[in-house]
Amino acid sequence: MMKHLLLLATFTGIVTGYCGPKAERKFEVLLRPEPRVEIELGDTISLVCAAHGHNMMDPLVYWVKGIGPDLNEEGKRMGPTAVGKSTFYIEKAEKEDIDNYKCVIEDCCSGNKEEITVEILVPEETCQDVYGVGHVVFGATWVFRNWTAAIADCESKGLELALPKNEEENAQLQRDLQASFETHPNAAKFAHENWCWIAATDEETEDTWLAVKDNEPLTYFNWDKKQPDNKDLPLLQKGKNQNIVGNSNLARTQNVAGIHRGTGMWDDSFVHYKRPYACLCPTD
Ligand SMILES: *[C@@H]1O[C@H](CO)[C@@H](O)[C@H](O)[C@H]1NC(C)=O
Ligand SMILES: [Ca+2]
């Protein structure tokens, strides 16, 4: 009997969507998953997202997969929508599960939404994983980062962002990126991103390309057809170009370089774009 009453109460709550007086309505997030979760393939993933409604029914909770470089793409809605609590559960994580996700908490009374993003990834490639030492080799990092953040990340590992000095190194970098793209689980979400950052910039003087490491002019280039074109950023559009920060004039032309992982050709691009990259491994 008791059980039936409880069921009935919950059921009524969902159908009528209890909404108290507007001023007193709010939801409180009770369980918030970590923004970055590192796992190994085969691990069980269990992430809980829960919220409670005050003076309203508990909000709806659901998960979305594949939310892109700025963690704000629409993505694919997963599983059923729950009330108050939703668990993202995968018994044995496979390559396809390595992605960016968000838990969406939606208040049906006001239409308010809160989105909590979670990046699920496996450990990154290290220099040891690639070829060992003694060669010019590159460890790829399959994380969406802007050019500045890519440089900072390599430096934080005691390395430097890759910059090929000649044709041989360029071919090596391209092969290393491609091989890693095909095998590393973190790379799957970059199927639509062919470009990877390299450590060259002409931000100081237009068309004078310098190496980040020592500010010396480059002597080797591998520009793609009609590049570098120093293209202007189209007028601020919704979404992609909305989050530009820093000096807006500089950010609006193409002052940093990337390499195409499929062809090895270079293009100048926008510093705020978020792309993968490789750090140069030590040769001694
Ligand atoms: C690059 O990313 C870093 C770290 O997220 C951020 O602090 C910085 O403002 C970004 N810079 C640009 C130009 O988008
Ligand atoms: Ca360009």
Image (tube, rainbow, N blue to C red):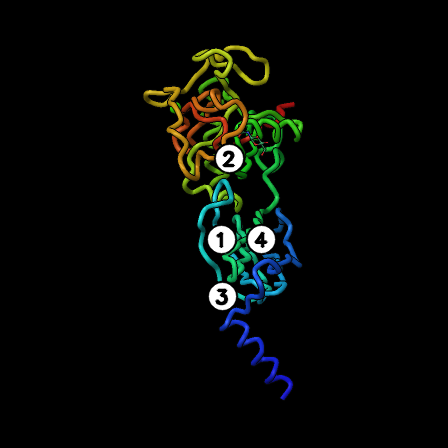
Q: Quadrant of residue 233?
A: top left
- The residue sitting at 61% across, 36% down in the picture is 126
Identified by mark 3, the residue type is: Pro
Q: Is residue 91 visible?
A: no
**Which is more toward the observer, 191 or 71?**
71
Nearest to N terminus: mark 4 or mark 1: 4
Location of residue 8 in the rendering, given as x and y in whole percent from the top left corner: 56, 81
Per the image, the residue denoted by label 1 is: 65
Queried on whether the Cβ of the residue with tag 3 lies below 8 angstroms from ligand 1, the answer reads no
**Local secondary structure at mark 1:** strand
Q: In screen coordinates, is 1 left or right of 205?
A: right
Nearest to N terminus: mark 4 or mark 2: 4
> Which numbered dot is residue 41?
4
Q: Nearer the viewer, mark 3 or mark 2?
A: 3
**Local secondary structure at mark 4:** loop
Nearest to N terminus: mark 3 or mark 1: 1
The residues tagged by marks 4 and 3 sit, at their Cα atoms, a distance apart of 25 Å
The residues tagged by marks 3 and 2 sit, at their Cα atoms, a distance apart of 33 Å
The residues tagged by marks 4 and 1 sit, at their Cα atoms, a distance apart of 17 Å
Per the image, the residue denoted by label 2 is: 276
The residues tagged by marks 1 and 2 sit, at their Cα atoms, a distance apart of 19 Å
**Which is more toward the observer, 127 or 195?**
195
Identified by mark 1, the residue type is: Lys
Q: Nearer the viewer, mark 1 or mark 2?
A: 1
Q: Residue furthest bottom?
A: 1
- Ligand 2, seen in the image, is in the quarter at top left
> Which numbered dot is residue 80?
3
**Local secondary structure at mark 3:** strand
**Which is more toward the observer, 229 or 83?**
83
**Local secondary structure at mark 2:** strand
- The residue sitting at 49% across, 45% down in the picture is 72
Identified by mark 4, the residue type is: Leu
